Amino acid sequence: MIASVSGRVAAVSPDGAVVEVGGIGLAVQCTPGTIARLQVGESARLSTSLIVREDSLTLYGFADDDERQLFELLQTAQGVGPRLAQAVLAIHPPREVRRAVSMADVKALMQVPGIGKKGAERLILDLRDRLGTTSVDTSLDGPALPSGAGPLTPTAPWRNQLTAALVGLGWSGKEAETALAALEPVAEEQLAGAGAVEMAVLLRQAIQLLGRA
């Protein structure tokens, strides 16, 4: 198993990144929140999980080991594969996933594209006794990856990155623009208060907004 990769970020796309390790470029599938913290040309470390299929080898990357472990645990639930497990973590940080399962918060889990009411109830039933708590704050808007993984600066192209992330999750460019227009005041407030745009926070809000639409 490839537990982690460390190296220079060679490329970033809406659904993943390429990390150069020992002269080899490894394609890693990541959640939009993790992608938003990667900068081309900078060094980064990703915890990873390798999914082996008859016709493919897919490497999934995460901000930390806790997120990776939860990704793998989610797949022990009936009907949850790697793509759906990744979608869960794209919407909710690990802390919120644990809270939703332990509190049987069906509505929170139904915010994830691909999970309906029955699927959420099944996931809660399968995982309630397996998910523990963590002493580490693993929120996507918390501490970022080491080396080039902090919050975006005021001059960073947050609009382009948010659009790319939403399109990568399946929404159209027009839908992404609608979400950006609605979230412009939120981004301005973040810039005025903290001096930076928290991409993961905006992404979760955009997904919730588009989900309701």
Image (spheres, helix red, strand yellow):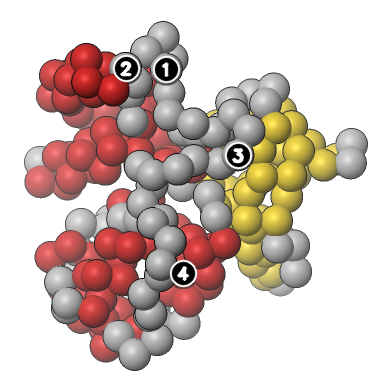
- Quickly name the residue at label 2: 195
Q: Residue at 18%, 45% (x, y): give it.
A: 208
Q: Residue at 28%, 38% (x, y): give it.
A: 201
- The residue lying toward the viewer, choosing from 24 and 140, is 140
- Quickly name the residue at label 3: 146
Q: Residue 15: x, y in percent?
A: 51, 41
Residue 102 shows in this picture: yes
Q: Quadrant of residue 206?
A: top left
- Quickly name the residue at label 1: 153
Q: Amino acid at mark 4?
A: Leu
N-terminal label among 1 and 4: 4
Are the residues tagged 1 and 2 within 8 Å (C-beta)? yes
- The secondary structure type at the circle numbered 4 is helix
Q: Amino acid at mark 2?
A: Gly
Q: Count residues near mark 2 (Cα–Cα under 10 Å), then give few for <14, some for 14-19, many for 20+.
A: some
Is 145 situated above or below 150?
Answer: below
